[in-house]
Image (cartoon, rainbow, N blue to C red):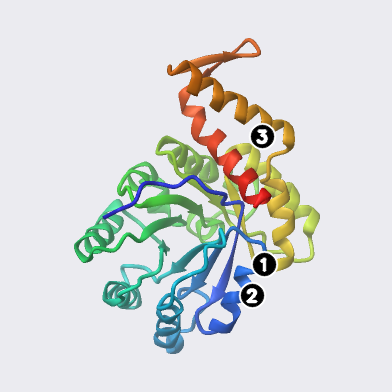
Amino acid sequence: MTQERTVRPRRSFIFSPGLRPEMFPKALASGTDIVCVELEDGIAPKDKETARRNAMALFAEPQADDGVERIVRINCLREAFGLADVQAVLAAATPPPALMLPKVRTPDEVVLLDDLLTERGHGTRLHVIIETNAALEAVHDIARSSSRIDALFFGGVDMAAELRCKNAWEPLLYARSRVVHAAASEGLDAIDVPYLDLEDSDGMRREAELVRDMGFSGKGSIHPKQIAILNEVFTPDEATIAHARRIINAFEEADTGLVVIDGKLIEKPVLRDMHRILSISERLSA
């Protein structure tokens, strides 16, 4: 019952605490492309059950077609809290549209969850955080482990701790590059870790531009005031949009695996990125 991967804007995301369901509508109205209801690190063990119940209740009613992607970050599948989260999702008549999986180590975890969702008949999509050393080693296998996966998220804070390196740009360059490589190989989006210094908007912009140029589709935020900058950085300009339209139209007219535009050879794999550019443009127009 899995759905086809949908090309859509994933320029920014923000967490909404499962303990505070009243904050969910505010997050949806913040301008972000993704709202992730938090059940993991941001929730104390004593509050996990309440947060889980709140999160499931949010999706008991039909969701508005507002262009915002909704995700629930469950707990690690290797922990009792994570298993309880999965049981709640499987028991729900109207499950969350997507789940974010933290602290993944092997593709087997993703395969198991995919199998359970398939058996239940849920079309829930998956987003996988690459934040452990084991996941970085197996990232290509993880990326191809399920057709439900839409994006790989880079968890820089935990990754730095795992790698015993400084949480800074240069020490994490290899890890980021490996995540982008795996995501691109499987046609997935790659989403970067939030920038943690809320007062350093210039630093966040610089880092967002760096990861954009590296191949990331978007970046997380820790506060709504960061979202406008992230959306700006990851939104293509008019010239880029026009170029994407030309490429898509050229492939439609040629019906081949490559075309030549302005003297440059362009092959069909670039079409996904061109469609993503237009999807962002269409959302902004809407």
In which quadrant of the rendered view does residue 260 lie? top right
CA neighbours of label 1 inside 10 A, class few (<14), some (14 to 19), many (20+): some
In the foreground, 75 or 23: 23
Residue plotted at (60% across, 69% down): 28
Q: Residues within 10 Å of mark 2 (few under 14, many from 20)?
A: few
**Vertical side of 267 occupied by 19: above or below:** below
**Left or right: where does residue 150 sit relative to residue 216?**
left
- Which structural element holds mark 2? helix
Q: Earlier in the sequence, mark 1 or mark 3?
A: 1
Horizontal and vertical percent position of residue 132? 43, 56
Name the amino acid type tagged 1.
Ser
Q: Position of residue 210 (x, y in %)?
A: 68, 42
Amino acid type for the residue under numbered disc 2: Lys
Q: Label 2: which residue?
A: 26
Kindly identify the residue that appears in the image at 35 percent across and 72 percent down: 94
* Label 1 close to label 3 by CB (< 8 Å): no
Label 1 belongs to which residue?
30
Residue 222 is tagged as none
Q: CA distance from mark 1 to mark 3?
A: 24 Å
For badge 3, the amino acid type reads Ile
The N terminus sits in image quarter: bottom left
Residue nearer the viewer, 286 or 28:
286
Look at the numbered discs 1 and 2 and tell me whether their residues touch, using CB distance below 8 Å.
yes
Residue at image position (67%, 67%) is 30
Q: Residues within 10 Å of mark 3 (few under 14, many from 20)?
A: some
Q: Nearer the viewer, residue 278 or 227?
A: 278
Tell me what residue is drawn at x 56 percent, y 74 percent. 16
Work out whether 106 lies above or below 266. below
Q: On the image, numbered disc 3 is attached to which residue?
A: 241
Tell me which numbered mark, 3 or 2, is placed earlier along the sequence: 2
What's the distance in space between the residues labelled 3 and 2, CA to CA? 30 Å
| Distance (Cα) linking label 1 and label 2 | 6 Å
